[in-house]
Amino acid sequence: MGGVAARRGRWAVVATALGLLPVGLLPLGLLPSAALAQAGGARMPIFDAHLHYSHDAWESVPPKTAIEILRQAGVMRALVSSSNDEGNQMLHAEAPDLILPSLRTYRTRAEVSTWARDETVIPYLQERLKKYRYVAIGEFHLFGADADLPVPRRMVQLAREHNLFLHAHSDVDAIERLFRQWPQARILWAHSGFERPDAVRAVLRRHSNLWADLAFRSEQGTVSNGVGKVESEWRAAFMEFPDRFLVGTDSYVPERWHYVGGNADFSRAWLGDLPKDIAERIGWRNGETLFSGKLVKKQ
């Protein structure tokens, strides 16, 4: 490595050694040798349920490079959204067998906190939905009573009309409000709401059409010398709801694309502490089951 890449690599190794960065956030080439050995051979495929390919990644991580990163990481399918949506379309055109497009509700990051009150969002969504095919709307940030504002309500209606998942970065209050608007909605809960496992379990019990991704979370397990261990409260959640969790990376900044491989191997390691069938469900089978038959053909 040289230049910026070398500095980033050295920082990652040092930060991990100091406990400042989970092993799962290391780029693949910087993983400890034991983790690489475990990842080698017939490694478990990964369904990455939370990726972004936004405008600031297009130059530093061109589409061909992004797809190569995913394939080298053993990602069999990826749910991807972007701000703006052109990034999504570039990736899908490059690898329609791999990319499952999700339509984001904002065109730039500046709209993350304003989109729910921006009436121009709905014509934008309608235009994209008319032009392209998607499997979901999201990831969108939406909290509390804002879920009942006119723009989010119309977004939910569009998801219903087009039979799309909702990928919601939301608190429990907003999740409940979304289900009240559309009781049959299928919601993928980004980052499991950053809730504790007991709270996640409580919401999953109330809603059979709710699934939780684990993107940008690492507290569910630890990895030491390539051997993973699942935290006890998370183990209870996974054992109760083996069909309701998915893993993900969350490439919310361009640099995160270089952590896709490391995150995949981190996931494989801690999943290895679960029974094989449950590990496979969380690692890839749940995603394949949810989106089976929804693979979007090249547009």
Image (tube, grey):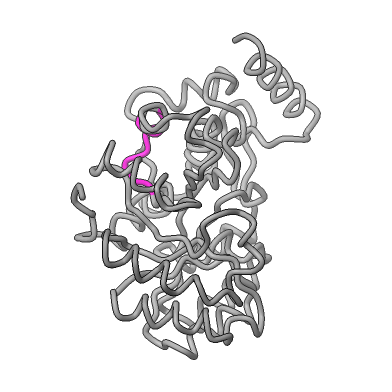
Seen as rendered, the residue at the extreme bottom is 180
Q: Which residues are magenta?
A: 69-78
| Corner quadrant of residue 71 | top left
Q: Is residue 222 left or right of residue 163?
A: right
Query: In the rendered view, would you say 264 is above or below 188?
Result: above
In the picture, measured across the screen, residue 75 lies left or right of residue 296, that is right
Residue at the right extreme of this rendering: 18
Q: Quadrant of residue 201?
A: bottom right
**Image position of 2 (left or right of 153):** right
Q: Quadrant of residue 166?
A: bottom left
Residue drawn 62% across the image and 52% down it: 220
Viewer-nearest residue: 170 or 253 = 253
Give coordinates of residue 164: x percent, y percent: 33, 70
Where residue 19 sits: x, y (%)?
A: 78, 34
Let me know if residue 96 is in the magenta part: no
Percent across and percent down for residue 113 are 66, 66
Q: Is residue 297 left or right of residue 89?
A: left
Q: Quadrant location of the N terminus? A: top right
Is residue 76 in the magenta section? yes
Rendered position, 196 above or below 108: below
